[in-house]
């Protein structure tokens, strides 16, 4: 549908990142550098994941759900978590509060993810004459992904950066982090194993991302309270 | 960094993989075949354009929108099964503007389709469509059509699209630029037509038949994504009908074809095979020659589909089989007859037997004078039991009588009926007869048949020439020349076998002087029997090869195959290449690929932009409230303590407590 549709879908896919950056105090504290560094870390992580996938995974002809392959993919997905750990802890950030650090890292992470996975199909596909809803749904997926990345970054910063956490909350934190980290495997299981259609999967992603965001927000504020 | 080149190549690979995975099912592509484009004596005829890029419309649009419909940017899709002849006659006769025309043929007319043989009612339906098709073909061939006309075959994808287009047209939504697709710069679209209210109520009430669906905002059905717009329209029930009209699916048909160019030197290629007879020792005279002639090329509304199984594929197959049988006889000097046999496959048949005329003119004078008798084969493949022998000499002529008697005796034995038809030609000079036929052409305005010719009329009057055909009258100019409805499913191989036996037997009896004797030279189950598998394989080959002469070159596989086959059966083969008469000019680009795109209107994109803008604004304000305002409150709490915050809210009541 030519450039108009491409612009619409691009706005849907990448707009929220820009909006998030400008709406929250991130822009005041000029955390753009952090975000960019996080994006670079994501790219490196993606490269490592690609190499691991190419080495260990078989190329299956059918589109069915193979538990063993999916397990391998989930394990490799934990490379993501390692990358996030690196971005949160090892990169030297300027003196910004933890609150903003995880947001900046999450934002950069999500932005890099969107660009890598969604920009190319958008450019190639959305500019054609044929109209499909695929790209709009992809944009919604990008939104859900942004929320998920922020939650994961929040939980990650809770796990690695905050030292004094209430003991009761620790297992919940780890459980939530595990769920969010394995989201890609869950969605691929839904798509292939259960055969859900794309709109349903996107709806599920949006719903779970909001739920996980709410939970991580509660956890984060709960962990902030002991200093009271 | 060292990782840069590796990284960039991996990213490229990723992009390619993702792109391939995403783009598989973007568009429906259908093979379509263009109407012939030709000039006749400078008069342009046929479809003059090849490239197509317009929105799809159906015949229902015209009936709903009436006479004010502007179709100059629409491609009309008309299935031939439901075609209204008067409508199309008006449309083409009055030269109304149209973006394009796509005629859909039932699959039985496809050269690749092999009829599984339905029941009697299927046959009658087939014949009905065949009649309509012949009429439409005649209309289209003789008209000058300034827009592209394509023929396609019905299949599921096209059916689905046509169903959607018809649905759109019923609700009265015109598939023009702003409501049904992209707007093209520089072309102001016609004003948006309001649909008649009656149609709307019908459509709206149809939707409300399932109240549960209208209440549920999201219907978890198995519809593919492209139909998802229906769900969103149901969500916005207040603006439902309006939204539905704006977001209705419309289709854009695109054929990317280059500008049609003239075929540079259209060639006419005649192939002749010579089988010499037995010359007795001491006989210095030339042996008489018998010529068996059939034209092999076709002409139809769609040159890429003109396979002409009956006209004149049946004649070619018969000629080849006769050649094979006589080659067996002539291979042995004891059974070689005292006649030379000349088998000629001529081209240029539809153009008043241009090829035959040129072949005769260029033939060696002595050879031409030895031709005693010529028989032309034309359309002998349909299942009727009646054949006609057309002659130009009067029936009282001794030679004609002899020949006809020979045919009659054999046909009686075979259970066929052969009639004699005499058609006088006034001119003794065949060249003048050709000029007369071209003048007849120029007078062609109301499709009144003015002149009709047979192939045997090209021979000089000295030769006893006849045409054997199932047609009782000579076909009109460019009629019965292998059009759209002439394909494998409409001929009968048994008839061809019978006709072969008829001609071969009567010729053999004449050659060997066995007239009147009851002898079956080509008896069944003998070594000289007619070979049905040979006939079938040639019929199949010819039924899948379009043979319009200007598009055949000397190295075309068909010509090579025919030449090789004649070379197998005869002693000497000559291929003669001539240029087609200058009165005819043909243009290329005979087929193309039709891309069917589902497009959403520009208003839909605008609505989407509005929705996205509002979403982003809402998101922005939500985040501002959430982060800055609440963080302010949180910082305030952090600094001042939680009690203070509560006291802030409780101040009025606490004051009351304090004062109390």
Image (tube, coloured by chain):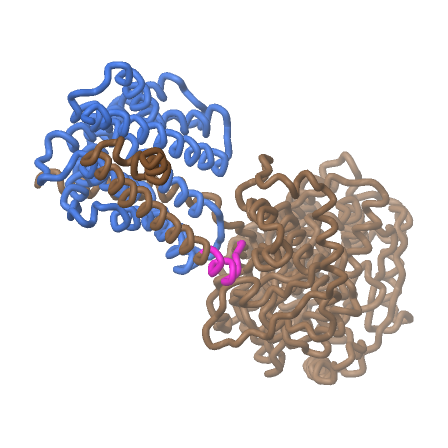
Chain colours: A blue, B brown
Q: Is residue B635 magenta?
A: no
Q: Is residue B604 above or below residue A162?
A: below
Relative depth, front residue between B228 and B214: B214
User: In screen coordinates, is B397 left or right of B173?
Assistant: right
| Residue A148 location, quadrant | top left
| Quadrant occupied by the N terminus of chain B | top left
Please provide percent x and percent y for residue B326: 69, 49
Residue occupying the point 78% across, 61% down: B132
Going by the picture, which residue comes out furthest to the front?
Answer: B660
| Residue A114 location, quadrant | top left
Q: Is residue B257 visible?
A: yes
| Quadrant occupied by the C terminus of chain B | top left
Please provide percent x and percent y for residue B529: 74, 40
Q: Is residue B62 above or below residue B491?
A: below
Relative depth, front residue between B595 and B472: B595
Residue occupying the point 63% across, 68% down: B348
Please provide percent x and percent y for residue B104: 67, 56
User: In screen coordinates, is A50 left or right of B462?
Assistant: left
Please provide percent x and percent y for residue B198: 76, 62
Residue occupying the point 28% across, 21% down: A173
Q: Is residue B139 above or below residue A183?
A: below
Relative depth, front residue between A77 and B204: B204
The majority secondary structure of the magenta stretch comes to: helix
Instruction: Please state the extent of the stretch shown in magenta in the rendering.
Output: B598-608
User: In screen coordinates, is B527 left or right of B228?
Assistant: right
Relative depth, front residue between B324 and B533: B533
């Amino acid at each position: 549908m030519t450039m108009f549709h491409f612009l619409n879908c691009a706005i849907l896919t990448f707009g929220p990142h820009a909006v998030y950056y400008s709406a929250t105090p991130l822009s005041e504290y000029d955390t753009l550098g952090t975000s960019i560094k996080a994006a670079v870390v994501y790219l490196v992580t993606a490269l490592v994941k690609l190499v691991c996938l190419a080495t260990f995974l078989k190329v299956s002809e059918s589109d069915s759900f193979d538990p063993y392959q999916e397990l391998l993919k989930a394990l490799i997905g934990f490379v993501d978590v390692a990358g996030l750990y690196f971005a949160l802890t090892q990169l030297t950030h300027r003196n910004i509060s933890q609150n903003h650090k995880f947001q900046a890292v999450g934002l950069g992470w999500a932005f890099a993810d969107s660009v890598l996975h969604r920009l190319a199909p958008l450019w190639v596909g959305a500019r054609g004459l044929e109209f499909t809803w695929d790209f709009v749904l992809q944009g919604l997926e990008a939104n859900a992904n942004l929320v998920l990345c922020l939650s994961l970054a929040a939980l990650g910063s809770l796990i690695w950066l905050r030292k004094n956490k209430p003991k009761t909350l620790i297992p919940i934190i780890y459980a939530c982090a595990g769920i969010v980290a394995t989201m890609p495997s869950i969605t691929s299981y839904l798509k292939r194993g259960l055969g859900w259609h794309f709109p349903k999967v996107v709806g599920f992603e949006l719903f779970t991302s909001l739920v996980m965001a709410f939970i991580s927000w509660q956890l984060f504020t709960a962990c902030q309270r002991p200093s009271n | 960094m060292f990782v840069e080149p590796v990284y960039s190549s991996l990213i490229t690979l990723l992009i390619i993989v993702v792109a391939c995975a995403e783009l598989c099912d973007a568009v429906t592509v259908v093979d379509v075949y263009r109407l012939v484009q030709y000039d006749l004596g400078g008069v342009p005829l046929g479809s003059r354009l090849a490239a197509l890029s317009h929105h799809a419309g159906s015949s229902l649009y015209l009936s709903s929108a009436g006479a004010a419909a502007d179709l100059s940017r629409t491609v009309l899709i008309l299935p031939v099964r439901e075609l209204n002849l008067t409508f199309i006659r008006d449309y083409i006769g009055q030269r109304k503007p149209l973006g394009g025309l796509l005629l859909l043929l039932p699959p039985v007319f496809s050269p690749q389709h092999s009829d599984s043989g339905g029941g009697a009612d299927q046959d009658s339906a087939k014949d009905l469509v065949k009649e309509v098709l012949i009429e439409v073909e005649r209309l289209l061939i003789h008209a000058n059509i300034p827009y592209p006309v394509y023929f396609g075959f019905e299949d599921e994808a096209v059916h689905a699209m046509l169903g959607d287009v018809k649905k759109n047209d019923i609700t009265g939504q015109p598939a023009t630029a702003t409501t049904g697709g992209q707007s093209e710069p520089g072309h102001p679209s016609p004003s948006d037509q309001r649909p008649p209210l009656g149609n709307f109520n019908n459509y709206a009430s149809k939707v409300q038949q399932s109240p549960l669906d209208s209440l549920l905002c999201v219907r978890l059905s198995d519809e593919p994504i492209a139909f998802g717009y229906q769900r969103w329209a149901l969500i916005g029930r207040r603006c439902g009908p309006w939204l539905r009209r704006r977001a209705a699916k419309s289709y854009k048909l695109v054929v990317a074809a280059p500008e049609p160019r003239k075929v540079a030197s259209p060639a006419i290629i005649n192939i002749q095979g010579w089988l010499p007879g037995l010359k007795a020792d001491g006989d210095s005279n030339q042996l008489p020659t018998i010529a068996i002639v059939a034209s092999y090329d076709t002409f139809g509304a769609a040159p890429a589909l003109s396979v002409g199984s009956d006209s004149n594929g049946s004649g070619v197959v018969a000629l080849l089989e006769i050649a094979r049988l006589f080659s067996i006889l002539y291979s042995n000097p004891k059974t070689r007859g005292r006649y030379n046999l000349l088998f000629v496959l001529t081209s240029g048949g539809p153009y008043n037997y241009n090829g035959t005329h040129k072949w005769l003119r260029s033939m060696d004078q002595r050879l031409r004078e030895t031709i005693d008798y010529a028989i032309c084969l034309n359309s002998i493949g349909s299942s009727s039991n009646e054949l006609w022998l057309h002659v130009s000499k009067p029936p009282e002529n001794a030679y004609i009588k002899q020949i006809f008697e020979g045919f009659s005796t054999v046909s009686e034995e075979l259970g066929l009926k052969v009639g004699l038809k005499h058609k006088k030609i006034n001119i003794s000079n065949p060249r003048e007869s050709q000029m007369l036929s071209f003048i007849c052409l120029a007078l062609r305005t109301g499709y009144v048949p003015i002149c009709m010719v047979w192939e045997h009329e090209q021979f000089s009057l000295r030769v006893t020439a006849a045409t054997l055909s199932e047609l009782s009258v000579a076909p009109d100019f460019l009629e019965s020349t292998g059009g759209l409805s002439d394909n494998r499913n409409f001929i009968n191989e048994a008839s061809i076998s019978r006709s072969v036996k008829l001609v071969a037997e009567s010729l053999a009896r004449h050659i060997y002087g066995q007239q009147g004797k009851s002898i079956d030279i080509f008896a069944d189950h003998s070594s000289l029997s007619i070979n049905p598998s040979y006939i079938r394989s040639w019929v199949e080959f010819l039924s899948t090869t379009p043979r319009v002469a200007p598009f055949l070159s000397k190295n075309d596989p068909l010509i090579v195959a025919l030449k090789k086959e004649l070379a197998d059966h005869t002693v000497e083969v000559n291929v003669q290449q001539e240029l087609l008469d200058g009165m005819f000019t043909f243009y290329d680009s005979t087929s193309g690929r039709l891309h069917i795109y589902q497009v959403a209107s520009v208003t839909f994109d605008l609505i989407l932009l509005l929705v996205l803008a509002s979403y982003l604004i809402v998101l922005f304000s939500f985040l501002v409230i959430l982060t800055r305002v609440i963080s302010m409150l949180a910082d305030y709490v952090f600094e001042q303590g939680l009690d203070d915050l509560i006291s802030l809210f409780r101040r009025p009541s606490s004051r009351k407590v304090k004062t109390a």
